[in-house]
Image: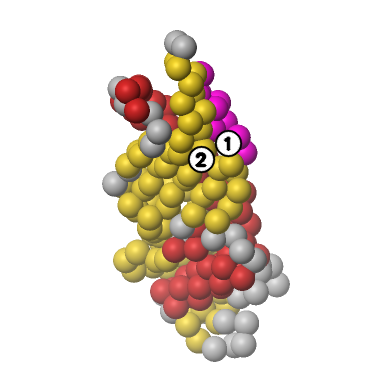
Amino acid sequence: MFTVLSATGELAGPNLYIDTILQNVSCVLRNEGEEYLSIADYELGNVRLTNGQISGLATLRRKGEARMDSDCDGATIEAKLVLEQVRLCYDYSAKVLFAKNQGDVSVCAGEIETFIRVHQTSDLSKSPILQVFMIRQLRGLRVNLSGLGPLSWLVNRLQRSLINMFRIRIQSLLQERVHGLIQTELNKFSLSELSMRDIIA
């Protein structure tokens, strides 16, 4: 079967393998000042959202046990990951009838559960590939708006739109930034020492 070796040749299990990858990704995000990522402006009807930021991506960690399976084609590691207290914040301006309001809005997810699948072919000269990286669940979603005054009734109307936007934005950011960082780290580690005898047995 496959064992997992770090870049220095040390033996590691699938949990340690995944944890090492995620720790390195979090360090990159913090060191490059990307704990708070700027995001594009957005419009929801008469509401304009500007100066957007998202935080919490560096909280990425493993949840539960990682699983590794191997066969004649190679080895696969699957794991659940979570991000905690991921927050999307914007300044907003809204024009309703003759009133114009300004304030800030935030959407926060208490926990975002993701799933990854890493595959290493039996050709050990090739790096492992991140085959799957997807969001499975968003828990504890909260929307907060300030500055609405007598127009607080707009919260209920905007809440669904803001949550849908959050889902789209977080999926896009994870794919654009975190997916790439994980793959970069995978290129530094290898799943190696395939034993054909163990697979056949």
| Neighbours of disc 1 within 10 Å: few (<14), some (14-19), many (20+) | some
Picture quadrant where residue 84 is located: bottom left
Residue 43 magenta-drawn? yes
Q: Is residue 147 above or below residue 34?
A: above
Q: Residue at x 54, y 89 (%)?
A: 10
From what the image shows, is residue 82 above or below residue 105? Answer: below
Say which residue appears at 59% left-offset and 88% top-offset: 9
Label 2: how many Cα within 10 Å (few below 14, some 14–19, many 20+): many
Magenta residues? Answer: 40-49
Q: Residue furthest right?
A: 125
Rounded to the nearest whole Å, what is the CA distance between mark 2 and mark 1? 6 Å
- Tell me residue 124's x, y (percent): 65, 72
Decide if residue 127 is on the left or right side of residue 141. right
- Comparing 80 with 149, the one in front is 149
* Mark 2 element type: strand
Q: Between 124 and 164, which is closer to the camera in this rendering?
A: 164
Circle on res. 50? 1
112 part of magenta stretch: no
Q: Earlier in the sequence, mark 2 or mark 1?
A: 1
Could you tell me residue 39's position as x and y percent?
60, 43
Q: What label sits on residue 152 in the rendered view?
A: none
Quadrant in which residue 64 is drawn: bottom left
Give the percent coordinates (x, y) of residue 33: 61, 64
Q: Residue at 57% of width from left, 31% of height from top?
A: 42
Q: Tell me the tag on residue 90.
A: 2
Q: Name which residue lies at 54% across and 47% down.
A: 53
Q: Are marks 2 and 1 in contact (CB under 8 Å)?
A: yes
Instruction: Out of 142 and 57, give the one closest to the viewer.
Output: 142
Task: Identify the amino acid type marked 2.
Answer: Tyr
For badge 1, the amino acid type reads Thr
- Quarter occupied by the C terminus: bottom left
